[in-house]
Amino acid sequence: MRRVHTAASIVVAALVLPLLVTTSLRIVLDDWIVRFEYAAGGVPEDRYGLDRDERTALALTGLEAITPGSRGVELLREARLPDGEPAFTEPEIVHMQDVRDLVGALLSFQLWAAVALAVATAALAFRPSTRAIVPRGLRWGVLASVGIAAVLGVVMLVAWDAFFTRFHELFFEGDTWRFPVTDTLIRLYPDAFWMGVAGWIAGLTVALAVLVWIAAGLWLRLVRPPSDRPA
């Protein structure tokens, strides 16, 4: 039975990092991230004529297009540059549809994983011997998550190009995500923008991990049998 309990805690632990990352993604999937990254000064000015307001408006349109519940990439087909020309090419629009599909899948996973965790918590709450399985697994997952986040953080700092390339190769087919520097997507979302976004996701993931660690610790103290509590 002890092995079963340990296995169940491991399953819970395995859900922690994906849940933390997708929760962080949900937080940054909002207008504030575009406005912040542009205002912070880390994103270089557009070399091909878009001013700050024009660029911000198009970047917000791109963000809305990949957000589940919006009108999707039709927004990109309607978008125009200041001279009246279409803002995005068809390959850019196809890629943004791929991004939208990925974001939708990740957010759906977050929802179902959270529901599964809640159901498991309720099911294990009836027996004193199983009440510690979920909080123990959460703590194991936090430790693993912080370790993985630390490693990825170092990789992003010292080898951003390699990290960025591997990420896209993992989630997108072939070279469909590569575009000339003159294309609108690259002008709106250069590497500096994505480095800022990645930093936010990493930071939020660690911050959420700390909160889960604290909550799981309190949870363990509540469910621990009286005989196991310190005098």
Image (spheres, rainbow, N blue to C red):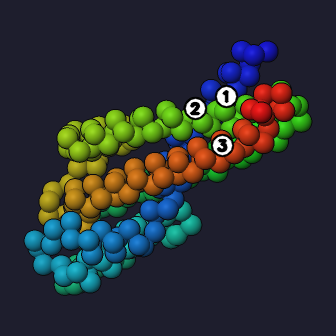
Quadrant location of residue 196? Answer: bottom left
**Which comes sooner in the sequence, label 1 or label 2?**
1
Disc 1, disc 2: CB below 8 Å?
yes
User: Which residue position holds label 3?
Assistant: 216
Quadrant location of residue 173? Answer: top left
Helix, strand or loop under label 3: helix
Out of 7 and 228, give the one closest to the viewer.
228
User: Which residue position holds label 1?
Assistant: 9
User: Which residue position holds label 2?
Assistant: 140
161 relative to 127, above or below: below
Residue 130 is at least partly visible in this image: no
* Residue neighbourhood size for the residue with mark 1, other residues' Cα within 10 Å, grouped as few (<14), some (14–19), many (≥20): many
Amino acid type shown at disc 1:
Ser
Q: Position of residue 26 (x, y in %)?
A: 51, 59
Measured Cα–Cα span from mark 1 to mark 3? 12 Å
Helix, strand or loop under label 2: helix
* Residue neighbourhood size for the residue with mark 2, other residues' Cα within 10 Å, grouped as few (<14), some (14–19), many (≥20): some
Out of 211 and 53, give the one closest to the viewer.
211
Q: Quadrant of the C terminus?
A: top right
Disc nearest the viewer among 1 and 3: 3
Is 62 situated left or right of 191 in this image? right
